[in-house]
Image (tube, rainbow, N blue to C red):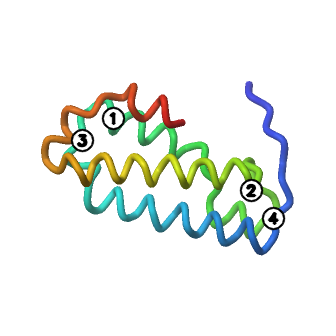
Amino acid sequence: MEWKIPHVVTVRTASLVRRLIELAQEVDSSWIAAASREARVEWALVREKWPTPADVRSGCVCLSDEELEMMINKVMRFRAILGRVGPAAAALTAASLTAAA
């Protein structure tokens, strides 16, 4: 069992979580279907780590603001890779996303 340190939600935390969710929705709706099966599995595993709106409302999340910023940057890179490659993104391997996580 993995123990996670709870981080108190601030206005900044809520904003970062919203941004992460917006980026995820963009990737989900526009790019992930073209990615390889391995990349889709890895994407799902990475998304499991993210705080949810319910977590924000509860007042504690599992990632610090710094970790949320790093995750946003990684998702933006993943999105850029998928966007640049387009349909050929199916060749994207899970290792690419794992290295970004």
The residue at the point 81 percent across, 65 percent down is 9
Amino acid of disc 1? Ala
Residue marked by disc 1: 39
Q: Secondary structure at mark 1?
A: helix
Q: Residue at x 44, y 41 (%)?
A: 44
Q: Is residue 77 above or below residue 53?
A: above
Image location of residue 50, percent across then percent down: 60, 50
Could you say where residue 38 lies in the image, as x and y percent from the top left? 31, 29
Question: Closer to us: mark 2 or mark 1?
Answer: 2
Which residue position is annotated with label 3?
35
Distance from the alpha carbon under mark 1 to that under mark 4: 30 Å
| Crowding at mark 4 (Cα within 10 Å: few <14, some 14-19, many 20+) | many
For the point 36% across and 64% down, the residue is 26
Quadrant (top left, top right, bottom left, bottom right) of the N terminus? top right
Q: Are marks 3 and 1 in contact (CB under 8 Å)?
A: yes
Which quadrant would residue 59 be assigned to in this image?
A: bottom right
Residue 18: x and y, percent?
58, 69
Q: Indicate whether 79 appears above or below 94.
A: below
Of the 4 image quadrants, the one containing the C terminus is top right
Where, by quadrant of the figure, is residue 19 drawn? bottom right
* Earlier-in-chain disc, 1 versus 4: 4
The disc, 2 or 3, on the residue closer to the chain's N-terminal end is 3
Mark identifier at residue 9: 4
Q: Amino acid at mark 2?
A: Asp
- The residue under label 2 is 65
**Is 5 on the left or on the right of 32, as rendered?**
right
